[in-house]
Every structure is written in C-alpha cells, then in structure tokens.
Image (spheres, helix red, strand yellow):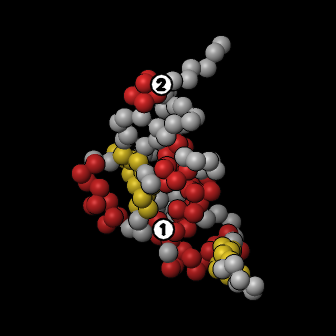
C-alpha cells in the first residue's frame, strides 16, 4: 500500500484554513499536555498531513499556572541556562520557574516536543501560552474551539 503525499498546487491548497484550538492546562500533566499540543501544531492528526509542509493548527494554552508535574519533579527538576561566559551556568529549580513564569515552562516543554527542523519556528508562531484564562479574550475573534485532551 502506497502512502499519499500531496505535491505542488495540491499541497499549497492544503495549507489554507488553519483552525484555532484552546487548551485548558488546569490539572494537566506537563509532559502529556506538551506532546498533544505539539501534535496539533505539527498537524499530525490531519488526513492531509505532509511532512515537509506546515499544515498545523493554532493552539492557545490557558491556565499555565495550574499545570501539574508528577513525582518529585517540582522539587528535583532543574532548568539550566548558560550566558556563554566562563562560570555563566545558571540553575533554576522548577518550583521557582512555576511561581515566576509558568507560561515559559509550558512553552519550553512544547518546544522540546517539536521536531528540530526548518518548520519549527513557523510552528511556534502558532502557539500562545497564557498564565490564566484572561489571555483567551485576545483571541475571541478567531473563535477557538476547545481541544479535548
């Protein structure tokens, strides 16, 4: 059985009409939420999925501050960043990141689930993450549909 892959003008026609979805992160496990949102951003669940085209949908994640982490990750997980200078390594525990900027933590988890290729930046532009539900009011014009996870 051959796999269908759209080519040329047919492939361009498939890119039109991206949907908008809203995901409520309340009581969702961080990693599981990230994988499901990444699949929607990639467009993997669509029958017209083509690996070399960005055919994914827009996703708005709300209530990032109510995300859940399993096990002892909240105390043991550490986020690292380096300034590029000697001795410039910074370590921040997940508990402090969650208090200060939970939307960054959710965004980083989703970024890690996306394929590392040239379409990654374009797919990330379709992702919006907000700390609470008030961010959803910015996207009422797009009429986002709730995404069941």
Front residue of 130 and 124? 124
Q: Position of residue 134 (x, y in %)?
A: 31, 66
Image point (52%, 62%), residue name: 107
Mark 1 → mark 2, Cα distance in angstroms = 38 Å
Q: Farthest residue toward the bottom?
A: 87
Q: Which residue in the structure is indicated by mark 1?
A: 103
Side of 119 relative to 75 (left or right): left
Q: Position of residue 81 (x, y in %)?
A: 66, 75
For the N terminus, give its image quadrant: top right
Side of 54 relative to 140 (left or right): right
Which of disc 2 and disc 1 is earlier in sequence? 2
Tags 1 and 2 in contact by the CB under 8 Å rule? no
Side of 103 relative to 112 (left or right): left
Front residue of 107 and 120? 120
User: Can you see residue 28?
Assistant: yes
Q: Position of residue 115 (x, y in %)?
A: 62, 47
Q: Which residue in the structure is indicated by mark 2?
A: 8
Q: Farthest residue toward the left?
A: 141
Q: Position of residue 149 (x, y in %)?
A: 49, 46
Image point (48%, 68%), residue name: 103
SS of the residue at dot 1?
helix
Image point (32%, 48%), residue name: 144
Residue 5 lies in quadrant? top right
Q: Can you say whether 132 is above or below 48 in the image?
A: below
Q: Can you say whether 35 is above or below 75 in the image?
A: above
Q: Can you say whether 87 is above or below 61 in the image?
A: below
Residue 72 lies in quadrant? bottom right
């Amino acid at each position: 059985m051959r796999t269908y892959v759209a080519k040329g003008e047919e492939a361009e026609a498939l890119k039109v009409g991206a949907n908008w979805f809203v995901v409520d992160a309340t009581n969702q496990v961080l990693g599981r939420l990230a994988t499901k949102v990444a699949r929607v951003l990639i467009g993997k669940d669509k029958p017209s999925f083509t690996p070399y085209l960005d055919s994914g949908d827009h996703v708005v994640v709300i209530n990032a501050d109510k995300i859940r982490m399993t096990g002892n990750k909240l105390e043991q997980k550490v986020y690292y960043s380096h300034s590029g200078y000697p001795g410039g390594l910074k370590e921040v525990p997940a508990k402090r990141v969650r208090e200060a900027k939970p939307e960054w933590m959710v965004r980083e988890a989703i970024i890690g689930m996306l394929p590392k290729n040239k379409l990654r930046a374009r797919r990330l532009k379709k992702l919006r993450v907000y700390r609470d539900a008030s961010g959803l009011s910015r996207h009422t014009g797009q009429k986002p549909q709730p995404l069941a996870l």
